Image (cartoon, rainbow, N blue to C red):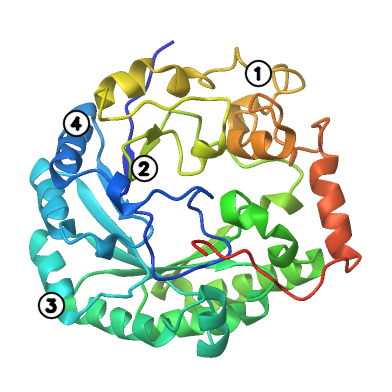
Amino acid sequence: MRVSLPYALTAEVTHRCPLHCPYCSNPIELQKRENELSTDAWLSVLEQAGDLGVAQVHFTGGEPLLRPDLERLVLRAREIGLYVNLITSGVGLTEERIRQLAEAGVDSIQLSVQASSAELADSIAGFRSHELKRQAAHRIRESGLPLHMNVVLHRANLHQIEEIIELCAEWGAQRLELANAQYYGWALRNVDQLLPRREQLQEAEAAYLRARERFGYHLELLWILPDYYEDFPKPCMGGWGKLSLTVAPDGRVLPCTASSEIRSLSFENVKERDLAWIWNDSPSFNAFRGYDWMPEPCKSCDRRELDYGGCRCQAFLLTGDARAADPVCKWSPNRSAITDRIGSIENGEFGTPNYAYRGR
């Protein structure tokens, strides 16, 4: 089978973060600082990624600003010719730091926000960060860099969606990703506190459509589907091992940021193997390429070239089998793993939010 070239590298340079968001995309088992790749190791990863054909790199975490060598990594990525995007909470983005990052050549910065009101935002983040984010947004715009923003949407903040969009426009965002929570890792642990009712979700989507009409080309709005309420799953990263790869803080190379949750797979490490071999030949990256691995109903389904059987991480987390049809699919024999959860939420079978916070 012909293997395509990867387009993007997600460089998770650390799992350390001042925030404790209950929907954090990092794995439950966070990597400690002493396990993080060294500067030289990351520089090697970037060079190998460029040789492999990667066009862009997203520096993320945790909070990538906690790495004092971040500017050096950005500079090397730009020297290689990669487009560099920084994904940050904004905490620690001082005037001096933004100047250094701009001089190193960062192309764009994506800033997260938790809600429109400081009280709710700080409560969700588990840290008083909202004002720091406002200051960070101002510094990014003052530096002349494009400001992109993102917000994870869930039961606690969906009612503020119009105000969130207004806030991001006011702060100078050119692009806003409205990402409905995806339930892996910490979000799955907190799903009973995060999953909205269908009615709340429909109202939020209507608000998004109104805002898109209102702002037009002045603010690009992206709506990331909440797949628990869909009939069919989202494509698995555009196909497992097809478009992108992630390097975790400890050097493990993953097909996506959540795939370390799949305990039935072992993932190679850049400390022992080069990136090209891992991408092209490793058992983990070849595990779900193509269609031969698929069981029914996926194998004979006309949608297999659209969604690739859905999310492998979600399949494993909800069924224990990474080969299974994603339970989001209405034809999955494990669909009840989703519908039972939705039913309990619709029937009000949840209490006061009591999040299991990331890092606590």
Q: Residues within 10 Å of mark 4 (few under 14, many from 20)?
A: some
Residue marked by disc 4: 48
Mark 3 and mark 1 lie on one chain; the one further toward the N terminus is 3
Helix, strand or loop under label 2: loop
Residue 277 falls in image quadrant: top left
Q: Give the distance between the C-alpha atoms of the residues marked 2 and 3, in whole angstroms.
A: 27 Å
Place of residue 356 in the rendered image (x, y in percent of width and height, measured from the top left): 62, 63
Q: Give the distance between the C-alpha atoms of the residues marked 3 and 1, in whole angstroms.
A: 51 Å
Image position of 193 (left or right of 235): right
Is residue 62 depicted above or below 124 in this figure? Answer: above
Residue marked by disc 2: 248
Residue at 8%, 46% (x, y): give it.
Answer: 79
Residue at 52%, 65% (x, y): give it.
Answer: 360
Place of residue 215 in the rendered image (x, y in percent of width and height, measured from the top left): 48, 77
Q: Give the distance between the C-alpha atoms of the residues marked 1 and 4, in whole angstroms.
A: 31 Å
- Which residue is outermost to the right? 347
**Mark 2, mark 3: which one is toward the viewer?**
2
Q: Amino acid at mark 3?
A: Glu
**Mark 3, mark 1: which one is toward the viewer?**
3
Residue marked by disc 3: 96
Helix, strand or loop under label 4: helix
